[in-house]
Amino acid sequence: METLFAHTYLLLFGKLSVGGLLTLAVPTFHKMERGFYKSSAAIYLGSAVIMALGDSYLWWSGTAAGVISPTATVVWLGFTALFIGYFVTLFVELPFLRARLFPITVFVGLLALALTGWQYAPASAGILTGIPYVVVPLAGALALGGAASGMLLGHWYLIDLELDLDPLLRMYTFCKTTLRAEIVIVAVSATVLWGTDALVPQGAFEAAFGAQAILVLARVAAWTLGLVLMVLIAKTLEIPQTMAATGLFYIHATTIAVGEIVGHWLLFRTGIPL
């Protein structure tokens, strides 16, 4: 059980690495200085390395039998290797290679995240009924990656004073859309699992709305605060005041990260992907 609990924390780095990498495609590449992609990708690559090495350690140590999938671990290592290759192309003029490595790396990262989510599905879950355990982590990765990239992009306006508002507006739209999508996906997934309670551990929903109710409230509170912050960010961008928006993105990124951790606690304690 200790290994599974540790893995729920480790999963946050996996989400950040995959979601963060994907969000690098939100701003138009040729409108941004290469430095933004280098610095942001370095952070997300570091998260990928932590996830891959952490998963590998839990697997090879023998303490994760029945918890860590060897297939997922290998895919995480492959994702990290591809990510390193993409990162290198940001420092050289190889647009042909960079343009092809990026989508491949993103796809492998999404696959690694999906396989990791599947590990938490009960043995009784089939391919279709295990979908909630796959789509919820993917939705969380996009919401977390968007929030982190919004914060990082906001700082770039201190460096490039001539940068127009379009990249930040595009990132804001992405953040708002993915946050709303995550809320809907989690709600639908929980409803589906509640209707087929044989697919979750016995007493899971009783625990979620009983002993673990405080965590459910915390998850909802994080989403609510995130939605409020999206409204505030929109108002600051109408002024426009990019530094105020960046400060709000700081709070938003922290809020989403805390919400994801709470969701992982609920997954560990109840077996429900929330």
Image: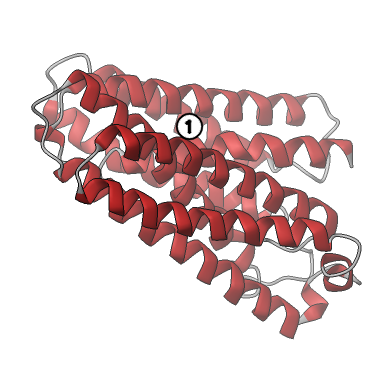
Tell me the SS state at disc 1. helix
Q: Quadrant of the C terminus?
A: bottom right
Mark 1 packing: few (<14 Cα in 10 Å), some, or many (20+)? some
Residue situated in front as seen by the camera: 195 or 103 = 195
Q: How is the image coloured?
A: secondary structure
Residue 241, compared with residue 111, is above or below; it is above
Q: Quadrant of the N terminus?
A: top right
Residue 196, compared with residue 96, is above or below; it is below
Q: Residue at x 57, y 54 (%)?
A: 137
Residue 253 location, x and y as percent? 49, 40
Residue 230 location, x and y as percent? 40, 54
Q: Residue at x 25, y 42 (%)?
A: 25
Give the amino acid type for the residue marked by disc 1 in the picture: Gly
Residue situated in front as seen by the camera: 145 or 202 = 145
Q: Residue at x 29, y 46 (%)?
A: 236
Q: Residue at x 44, y 28 (%)?
A: 44
- Does 227 sit left or right of 4 as displayed? left
